[in-house]
Image: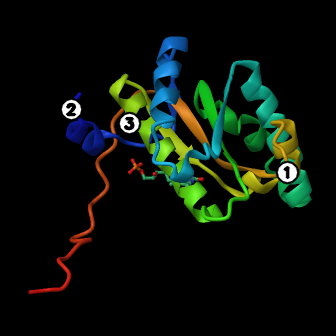
Amino acid sequence: MLLQEAIHSRRSMPVLGLPMPNEAQLDAVFLAAARAPDHRLLRPWRYLVLKDDGLNQLGQAFVDGMNELDPDRALRDHQRLLEMPLRAPMIVVAILSLNAHPTVPEWEQWLSLGAGVQNMLLTLHDQGFAGMWRTGDLVASMAVKSFLGLADHEQIAGFIYIGTAHGEKAAPALPNSIWQHWPQA
Ligand SMILES: Cc1cc2nc3c(=O)[nH]c(=O)nc-3n(C[C@H](O)[C@H](O)[C@H](O)COP(=O)(O)O)c2cc1C
């Protein structure tokens, strides 16, 4: 697929099914993620791949995490939280591993991670898969972070739901114009 075609035809799909990427395809996805622009090459990102029972365990961690953030909601949404990770056969957890650096502030490290995730999404699309980047309150939950083994300097930047899209989604409208020459003529 040509790069321009891939950029413009990629869609985030809320419900994804099988097939999911195999090991060789995952290798290609993470090689692409590692090509992200990265000031001082700090490599401030790492990724966890969850599937099968890992997704069931993540559902339980979502319940525990919501219990910590909002116990009433955890009770009310118990089943929904348990099933949330099952909206795709694979989830990649994108983790920001922050470095304390004298010239590379935290926001630059966040941006590097975002560029890596976009490389991932485009590579998945090129392979015939789809992905959807999701966050929500649970990214900040200690229960979820500790379930996934995050260190103190790490944060969850997103759950990338991955699989095969069965169905189509129209392209979101593009903004009219996001650029101009400067100074203007
Ligand atoms: C950092 C980040 C977090 C996001 N979190 C969510 C989310 O929790 N739930 C959701 O429905 N969409 C979320 N989105 C948006 C979708 O991933 C997607 O980009 C959006 O629906 C537009 O669809 P498109 O990628 O096909 O243009 C998030 C996007 C980003 C960049």
Q: Would residue 4 be visible to someone looking at this image?
A: yes
Residue at figure coordinates x 60%, y 34% from the top left? 87
Q: Which mark is residue 2?
A: 2
Nearer the observer: mark 1 or 2; the answer is 1
Residue for badge 3: 122
Check disc 3 and report its element: helix, strand or loop: helix
Q: Position of residue 79 (x, y in %)?
A: 79, 40
Check disc 2 and report its element: helix, strand or loop: loop
Question: How far apart, in angstroms, are the residues tagged by discs 3 and 1?
Answer: 30 Å
Q: Would residue 163 be visible to someone looking at this image?
A: no
Relative to residue 156, is residue 147 depicted above or below?
Answer: above
Relative to residue 55, is residue 174 depicted above or below?
Answer: below
Check disc 1 and report its element: helix, strand or loop: loop
Is 77 on the left or on the right of 48, as rendered? right
Which comes before the other along the chain, label 1 or label 2? 2
Residue at figure coordinates x 80%, y 43% from the top left? 62
Which comes before the other along the chain, label 3 or label 2? 2
Residue for badge 1: 152
**Label 2 sits on what residue type?**
Leu
Query: Which residue is more in the foreground, 57 or 185?
Result: 185
**Label 1 sits on what residue type?**
Asp
* Residue 133 lies in quadrant: top right
Q: Residues within 10 Å of mark 2 (few under 14, many from 20)?
A: few
* Residue 102 lies in quadrant: bottom right
Q: Position of residue 148 (x, y in %)?
A: 81, 36
Q: Position of residue 132 (x, y in %)?
A: 50, 41
Relative to residue 162, is residue 143 depicted above or below?
Answer: below
